[in-house]
Image (cartoon, rainbow, N blue to C red):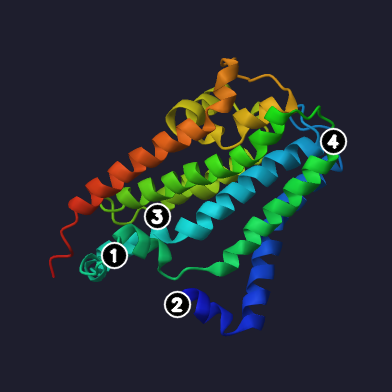
Amino acid sequence: MWVRSAMAYRTSFVMMALGNFAVTALDFVAIAIMFSHIDALGGFTLPEVALLYGTTSTAFGLADLALGNMDRVGRRVRDGTMDTLLVRPASVLAQVAADRFALRRLGRVTQGGVLLVWALARLDVRWTPVSLLLVPVMLAAGAAIFGAVFVAGAAFQFRANDASEVQNAFTYGGTTMLQYPPTVFATDLVRGVTFVVPLAFVNWLPALRVLGRDDPLGLPGWVDFASPLVALVCCALAGLAWRAGLRSYRSTGS
């Protein structure tokens, strides 16, 4: 329904999608400006940073397209409109995700994909079947990990009704952080996004394998291939958190 609504005004939809494309592209413009004054950032060249940017932006864009509306859960809990979803013969999670579905968010996915293609064409690395396979794995596993964070954040909003910004700190904030090399951050922060909120598995660890660079934490080599497993665990935990949050819902009491 929301897609049909958006396509009813095609010119408006195209303008909004292009606007989304342009706004998200400004992040990389800032990176490109930095590289007009330096040769490397944390030891990474511009194409290498573009690989990080393209993979995380595309993965996050896919998750945001499918589950970006999960931050509305807190609002629904506060005003009691969550009740209307509970009485329908459909998954509440699917209903929340589909509510006000914004197809214009394809602009972010497109922008990240274009930059990723450019980075792959400019990288000076030795491509092997394994490294080639890691690129689509990064995108799929990264989208699943970000999706799990969206769902877990929404589950938290059943307890803390006004916590959408906490969720955004890990989703929008996480994707901004992953656009930069791990070598520019403190080691404790890198440990946190590896072992606590495993955003490093979105692109940092597999990308280091693709680029032939050392892991700043000195982890075993097999960890670079663990993104699908981490994504599966994250999705399972997020699903349990969502079910627990939904069971605790007691409406507004009004």
Alpha-carbon span between mark 4 and mark 3: 37 Å
Q: Quadrant of the C terminus?
A: bottom left
Mark sitting earlier along the chain (4/3): 4
Disc 2 marks a residue whose amino acid type is Met
Q: Tell me residue 226's x, y (percent).
A: 52, 27
**Which dot, 2 or 4, sits closer to the camera?**
2
Q: What residue did someone put label 4 on?
A: 38
Q: Is residue 217 visible?
A: no
Q: Are marks 3 and 2 in contact (CB under 8 Å)?
A: no
Q: Regarding mark 2 in the picture, which secondary structure is present there?
A: loop
For disc 2, the marked residue is 1
| Res 227 seen here | yes
**What residue is at 30 percent from the left and 60 percent from the top?**
91
Instruction: Determine whether the residue tagged by mark 4 lies in a helix, strand or loop.
Output: loop
Residue 164 disc label: 3
* Disc 2: CA contacts within 10 A as few (<14), some (14-19) or many (>=20): few
Q: Where is 172 relative to 223, above or below? A: below
